[in-house]
Amino acid sequence: MKALLGWLSGFAEVDEMKKTVEELLQCQCWIIDILPSQVPEDSPGQYFSVEKYFLQGNRREEIKQKHINLVLKLNCYRDISIDDETAINPLPEHIADEMKKRHLYIMIGESMILSEPDDTHLTVFNPDSQLLELIRQIASGEGLFVWKPTF
């Protein structure tokens, strides 16, 4: 019976995490990117060709490493967890491996970072002003920019 209750509580935790993620996805967000601002829809440049270039070969891996570095440095200051995993502050190697492999929700208190393995950006949802400033400082050190999207 105890094992069954533990198993069922695992489902409750997953359901609660999904609810939290869904709520955070509706919150204000910021972009951590290789570009200093959102590219306007009517931009005369060639955004999609440039993005494709950055997603090829070692360039994608270099960008992802900057994302990983940012999250790991952030973890020096804040507790983090990943998706529905119960571990707080998982090993840095685990965080890095997961960020390289899959779509990942990185939970930081009442905030969340969305990481996707094949994107040039991260998305931060519901950051408080202190967290946002810390992210800006770390991002700057990694050669990344933080900006608020206009939808």
Image: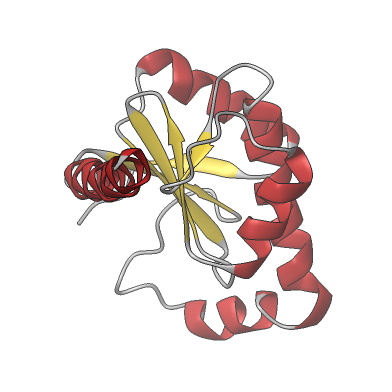
Q: Quadrant of the N terminus?
A: top left
Residue 80 at what x, y percent from top left? 53, 30
Q: Is residue 128 above or below residue 27?
A: above
For the image, the number of numbered tags is 0
**What residue is shown at x 62% (from left), y 27% (from top)?**
74
Which scheme is used to colour this image of the protein? Answer: secondary structure
Q: Residue at coordinates 46% horizontally, 20% vertically from top-left?
A: 131
Give the side of residue 9 with respect to residue 115, left or right: left
Q: Position of residue 67 (x, y in %)?
A: 65, 49
Q: Residue furthest right?
A: 58
Question: How far from the left and from the top, in percent, is residue 2?
Answer: 33, 38
User: Percent x, y for residue 122?
Assistant: 50, 52
| Quadrant holding the C terminus | bottom left
Q: Is 138 drawn above or below residue 12 in the view shown?
A: above
Front-most of 120 and 86? 86
131 to the left or right of 110: right
59 or 95, nearer to the observer? 95
- Residue at point 63%, 38% (across, down): 71
* Image position of 9 with respect to 108: above or below: below
* Image quadrant in which you'd find residue 6: top left
